Amino acid sequence: MDSLSKYSDQIKSMLVEYAPKFIFAVLLLVVGLWLIKKVIAVAKIGFERRKFDKSLVSFLSSIISLGLKVLLIITVAGMVGIQTTSVIALLGAAGLAVGLALQGSLANFAGGVLILMFKPYIVGDTVEVMAQKGVVTDIQIFHTILRGDEDKTIIIPNGPLLNGVIINITSKHL
């Protein structure tokens, strides 16, 4: 009986100690997720007002949402009492490893984002890039597709494309 009373006292003291932290953490999680939704909605409106490409709006919104949710979860975990220092270090190391492994793809991705944001050319423009000439048929996040002479399909990675000379022959949008 004495050990049962001892365990009961331990459980009560743990509830008194951890219940407020847990309730506040759950409250923060709910409010944080609601705020993230609102921030994403405002960001989408801002992107659309600046006439960002729809695929870029969707992608940037997803990236912002993911980043904010990771920060929220780490914050909530720290409030509950979980040591987050090692988790943050692990995420940083994983991000560095992935970045180094995907260096070429990330350059193409960054080029695609910049092309979609600054629009040096749009679909339908006739351009000359990297010794290739054609009509832009599609601008994707990693590469641009041209329709060249004799109906050839030319696929050019966005990273090197953005770092080179772009001659926009038609400039329909300028």
Image: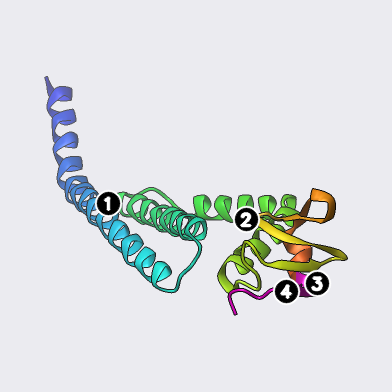
Q: Quadrant of the C terminus?
A: bottom right
Residue 137, percent across and down? Answer: 66, 55
Report if the CB atoms under discs 2 and 1 are less than 8 Å apart: no
Give amino acid for label 1: Leu
Separation of residues labelled 1 and 4 (CA atoms):
49 Å
Give amino acid for label 4: Asn
Report if the CB atoms under discs 1 and 4 are less than 8 Å apart: no
Dot 1, crowdedness within 10 Å: few (<14), some or many (≥20)?
Answer: some
Residue 140, percent across and down? Answer: 63, 54
User: Of the residues tagged 1 and 4, which is closer to the observer?
Assistant: 4
Separation of residues labelled 3 and 2 (CA atoms):
17 Å
Separation of residues labelled 2 and 4 (CA atoms):
19 Å
User: Could you tell which of marks 3 and 2 lies nearer the N-terminus?
Assistant: 2
Give amino acid for label 2: Ile
| Start-end of magenta stretch | 163-174
Q: Quadrant of residue 136?
A: bottom right
Q: Coloring scheme of the render? A: rainbow
Separation of residues labelled 3 and 4 (CA atoms):
13 Å
User: Could you tell which of marks 2 and 4 lies nearer the N-terminus?
Assistant: 2
Residue sitting nearer the eye, 66 or 125: 125
Question: Which residue was labeled with disc 3?
Answer: 164
Per the rendering, the mark at residue 29 is: 1
Q: State the residue at coordinates (77%, 56%).
A: 156
Residue sticking out furthest to the front? 150
Q: Which SS class for mark 1? A: helix
Per the rendering, the mark at residue 147 is: none
Question: Which residue was labeled with disc 4?
Answer: 168
User: Could you tell which of marks 1 and 4 lies nearer the N-terminus?
Assistant: 1
